[in-house]
Amino acid sequence: MEQVSGLLSWALSRVLWLSGRSERGAARQPRIMEEKALEVYDLIRTIRDPEKPNTLEELEVVTESCVEVKEIHEEDYLVIIRFTPTVPHCSLATLIGLCLRVKLQRCLPFKHKLEIYISEGTHSTEEDINKQINDKERVAAAMENPNLREIVEQCVVEPD
């Protein structure tokens, strides 16, 4: 009986550990989310600004701390980006959000849901822009415009 109890205890602890619900698994979860966030940041930091010859990282439009990753289901993640335009009236904030979305939709190697926002209080029309860059129909319509698509392509192309 003692062997059966010990075996059940071992099996239960193994299942909890594998599912991430044990203390060791719970400690592993934040590390995995941090790794995924760094993976996302590595993809977006090289996006070029539409107006300037700099990357979004160089202009501090995106930083490591602006990326958050949460697990929704097993191997399915919510990626949240909060970017900061260079000025509160930046006319290209929507285009920058579109570039972020396009680059991540193309390049993220894991299943994800994407939410992109302007950092709170950093743009005069942040609510309107947040709605635009998170609306699938508006994003699809924007990418059908050949001029806009060309600008996005130039911004998201990988540096040599």
Image (tube, helix red, strand yellow):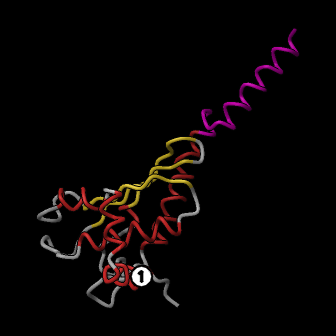
Which segment did they paint magenta? 1-25
Q: Is residue 74 magenta?
A: no
**Residue ID at (26%, 86%):** 51
Q: Is residue 15 magenta?
A: yes
**Residue ID at (20%, 57%):** 120
Q: Label 1, on which residue?
A: 153
Q: Is residue 152 left or right of residue 104?
A: left
Type of secondary structure dominating the magenta stretch: helix
> Residue 44: x, y in percent?
43, 72
**Residue ID at (41%, 82%):** 153
Q: Is residue 58 left or right of residue 30?
A: left
Residue 52 occupies which quadrant of the picture? bottom left
Q: Amino acid at mark 1?
A: Glu
> Residue 73: x, y in percent?
54, 41
Q: Is residue 8 left or right of residue 147?
A: right
For label 1, the SS is: helix
